[in-house]
Amino acid sequence: MKNFRKLVYGYYAKYARNSLPWRNTRDPYRIFVSEIMLQQTQVARVLEKYSAFIRAFPSAHALARAPLGAVLKAWQGLGYNRRALALKKSAEKVVSEFKGKIPRERQALEALPGIGEATSGALCAFAFNQPVVFIETNIRSVFIHHFFKDARNISDARLLPYLEKALDRKNPRQWYYALMDYGVYLKGHTVNPARKSLHYKKQSPFQGSNRQIRGKILKALLAKKQLSAAGLARLLNTGVPRVNTMLKALCKEGLIKEKGRFFSIYA
């Protein structure tokens, strides 16, 4: 483990991504926003949106009182718009239950909308420098590459003892930054080690997918204020049945609302 830490920190000393804006703040709210944005989204895309989003909503209070339409508009381009809704609902809960301060306890974090084990662990480490153990895709790649080279279908449960032993308990924030940066390097210069994970799932193509149609519906409603299913189908050059399926799902999730024949962003 001593040699392993030396290797990871050695890479980090030369190639750390310290220019990332969420690494240059100790404001838990700003780190919270970055972690939600980084879920299932590449760093380059988050960099395009993060600073403008923080300027528009500089605190949990500002985000909580903002109209959902304004939040979704600032989120455009990041995909998975349910995360924007979850982020806003989390801000509302942080304001109502924690006086606008992101909670430090992992259990309290996981009670917020859209927060699972990986995100709560990242927040504990990056926002509060707590020595917790968590796994995400880049961290998973590092440990599989170094300790399970000849194995297949490796569960996270098998990795956890190695994470526990390797953890730098004096500076977990820096240790996880180093692991993530090294994991990004490995995925770009070797066959992605994460493919050996039991939990690996290849993302389906975006072009023509339901995710793309959902995003286009929200974008159209943000621009036009309200549209019918037939109007959306014409605008998106998509069949009405498919549009109706997406509209029902978006209504159920609380992103849009229906009034008569028309749909609009939920307010």
Image (tube, rainbow, N blue to C red):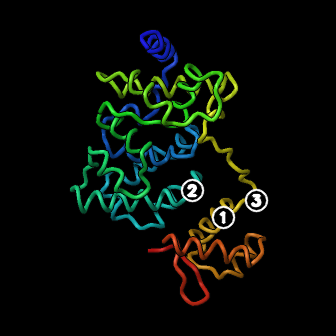
- Residue type marked 3: Gly
**85 relative position to 111: left or right:** right
The residue shown at (56%, 75%) is 225
- Alpha carbon of mark 3 to alpha carbon of mark 1: how far? 11 Å
The quadrant the N terminus occupies is top left
Tell me the SS state at disc 3: loop
- Residue type marked 2: Tyr
Q: Are marks 1 and 2 in contact (CB under 8 Å)?
A: no
> Of residues 193 and 236, which is closer to you in this image?
193
- From what the image shows, is residue 90 above or below residue 18? below
Question: Which label number is shown at residue 216?
Answer: 1
**Mark 2 — residue?**
80
Q: Residue furthest bottom?
A: 260
Q: Are marks 3 and 1 in contact (CB under 8 Å)?
A: no
Sort mark 2 into few (<14), some (14-19) or many (20+) by Cα contacts within 10 Å. Answer: some
Q: Would you identify the image quadrant in which residue 34 lies?
A: top left
Q: Where does residue 215 sit, x and y in percent of width and height?
A: 63, 62
Q: Where does residue 126 sit, x and y in percent of width and height?
A: 36, 34
- Alpha carbon of mark 1 to alpha carbon of mark 2: how far? 12 Å
- Mark 1 vs mark 2, foreground winner is 2
> Of residues 240 and 3, which is closer to you in this image?
3
Sort mark 3 into few (<14), some (14-19) or many (20+) by Cα contacts within 10 Å. Answer: few
- Residue type marked 1: Lys
Q: Earlier in the sequence, mark 3 or mark 2?
A: 2
The residue shown at (42%, 56%) is 87
Q: Earlier in the sequence, mark 1 or mark 2?
A: 2
Q: Earlier in the sequence, mark 3 or mark 1?
A: 3
- Alpha carbon of mark 3 to alpha carbon of mark 2: how far? 15 Å
Question: Which label number is shown at residue 208?
Answer: 3
Sort mark 1 into few (<14), some (14-19) or many (20+) by Cα contacts within 10 Å. Answer: some
Tell me the SS state at disc 2: loop
Tell me the SS state at disc 1: helix
